[in-house]
Amino acid sequence: MLRDPSLYLIDIREAIERIQEYLAGMSALEFQKDRKTLDAVVRNLEIIGEASKSLSPQIKELAPDVEWRKVAGLRDILSHEYFGVDVDIVWDVVQNKLPGLRQVVTRLLESTS
């Protein structure tokens, strides 16, 4: 049984929301020192990447400004290079890329429902 494509968008949005919840009020330095939060954030970035791989080309075409390959590629880097994860890059992604991705995903969910 095929999964409804919009469920992947929901997975992405929920993972972003969890990351934002985990990091609420946290500084970059606090994040670097908090292994539990880092692990939770990395796991949710992996979920975002995996879900983005499962999006149909038609959905991706509705948001050509999103670098879907990079979103999926981050998942591969995080899951295969875990011990070499650069915390500063993770922090940059969650602070500077995820808010825009959340807006796009919300728009896609509204347009596909």
Image: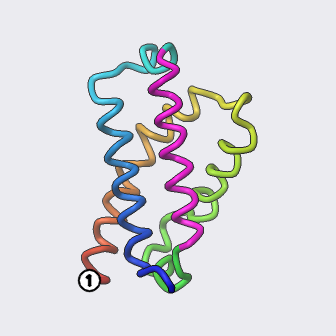
Residue 43, position as x, y percentages in the image: 53, 42
52 in relation to 17, above or below: below
Residue 95, position as x, y percentages in the image: 41, 37
Q: Which residues are magenta?
A: 34-54
How many labels were placed on the picture? Answer: 1
Please indicate whether residue 51 sits to the left or right of residue 112 in the image. Answer: right
Please indicate whether residue 60 sits to the left or right of residue 79 in the image. Answer: left
110 in relation to 50, above or below: below
Judging by the rendered image, the residue that carries numbered circle 1 is: 113
Query: Residue at the spot x=48%, y=67% of the render?
Result: 65
Magenta stretch: residue 12 in it?
Answer: no
55 in relation to 102, above or below: below
Tag 1: amino acid: Ser
Query: Residue at the spot x=50%, y=81% of the render?
Result: 61
Q: Mark 1 falls on what kind of element?
A: loop
Q: How is the image coloured?
A: rainbow
Query: Residue at the spot x=38%, y=49% of the render?
Result: 16
Residue 18, position as x, y percentages in the image: 34, 43
Q: Quadrant of the C terminus?
A: bottom left
Magenta stretch: residue 41 in it?
Answer: yes
- Quadrant assignment, res 49: bottom right
Query: Residue at the spot x=38%, y=40% of the render?
Result: 19
Along the viewing direction, whichever of 103 and 7 lies nearer the viewer: 7
Q: Give the residue furthest to the front.
A: 1
Crowd tier of the residue under label 1, counting other residues whose Cα lies within 10 Å: few below 14, some 14–19, many 20 or above: few
Instruction: Please tell me whether the stretch drawn in magenta is mainly helix, strand or loop.
Output: helix
